[in-house]
Image: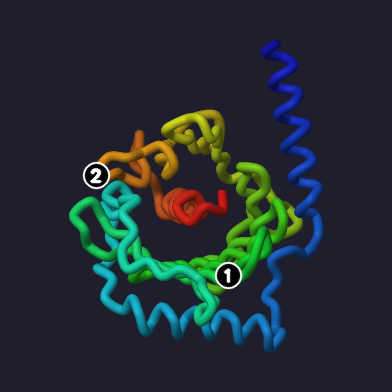
Amino acid sequence: MLVFTVALLITGVVYLLARVLTPILSATDSKAWKGLLKSLGEHLNKRYNNLVPWDKDMLALLSLNLQEEKKTGWMNSTASGVFSTIYHEPVLAYAQQGTGSNKVTLARTSNREYVFRHKAKETEIWLNQQPLGLYIDGNLISAGREGKLIGRLERNKDDAAFPVLFGESTTATLSNPQLIHSPNPRALTLYRAVNTEEENTLLALAILNMTGQA
C-alpha cells in the first residue's frame, strides 16, 4: 500500500509539472485584463482603505471573521469583504468578479497584493504583479518552465482542518470555513516558524480557502 501511494503521488506530481512546462502566468497586456484589475483595485481603495499593518505575527492571528461583506446582485457585479484578525482588526481585503468557475480575485494586505485567475480546476496566482504559481487540485506549482511543487493543501470537505505540506511535513492547517462555528475562528494554525516565501505560499492558500476557491 505504501509503495502504491508513493507511486501515485509521484505520478500526480509529474503530471502537474508537465502542465506547467509551458509559459504560464505571463503578464497579460490586454485592455480588458488591465481594466478588470483596475476596477477591482478601485473597489478595494474605496471600501477597505483602513487595513492594519501586516507584520510577522499576522499570519497566526488571521481569522475567518468576514466584515463589511458585499455580495453580487442586480446592481453590483463585485463581491468583496475584509477579513479581520482574532482581535477584530481589518487586515485582509478582497474583491472578486466572475461567474461559475471563471473568476478573478484581487486580495490585499497592507504590504501584499495577490491576483487569482480561476479557470475551471486551475488557478493562476500573482503576488505583487509577479507570477507566483499555478494551483491545481490542492497542489501549488511554482511559475515557469521549471515548475516545482512548493506546497500542497490536503483538502477533505468533511475535515475541520486541512493540512498544508511543504515537502513531506505538515507546516500548518487551514480551518474549514464550513465546519468551524466558533465565535472567533482562526484561519490557520502554524506548527513552526516560516520564512517569507513560505508565508507567501501559506497566505495564498489561505485566501483561496477563505474565499471558497480552493
Q: Which residue: 65% across, 57% down? A: 123
Q: Which residue is mark 1?
A: 130
- How far apart are the two marked residues, 2 and 1, measured between alpha carbons? 36 Å
Q: In x, y percent, where is residue 70?
A: 41, 70
Quadrant assignment, res 133: bottom right
User: Is residue 108 visible to the viewer in this orientation of the structure?
Assistant: no
Q: Which residue: 58% across, 45% down? A: 150
In the displayed structure image, the side of residue 195 where residue 97 appears, left or right: right
The residue most toward the front is 74
Residue 38, placed above or below residue 136:
below
How crowded is the residue under tag 2: few (<14 C-alpha within 10 Å), some, or many (20+)? Answer: few
User: Is residue 193 visible to the viewer in this orientation of the structure?
Assistant: yes
Quadrant assignment, res 29: bottom right
Answer with mark 2 or mark 1, whichever residue precedes in sequence: 1
Query: Relative to the observer, which residue lies in front, 47 or 55?
Result: 47
The residue most toward the left is 87
Q: In x, y percent, where is residue 180?
A: 36, 38
| Residue 170 badge | none
Q: Which residue: 74% across, 63% down? A: 24
Q: Secondary structure at mark 1?
A: strand
Q: Which residue: 45% across, 85% down? A: 42
Q: In x, y percent, where is residue 149?
A: 64, 44
How crowded is the residue under tag 1: few (<14 C-alpha within 10 Å), some, or many (20+)? Answer: some
Q: In x, y percent, where is residue 187?
A: 36, 46
In the displayed structure image, the side of residue 56 where residue 128 appears, left or right: right
Please state which amino acid type lies under the numbered disc 1. Gln
Q: Which residue is mark 2?
A: 183
Quadrant showing the N terminus: top right
Please state which amino acid type lies under the numbered disc 2. Pro
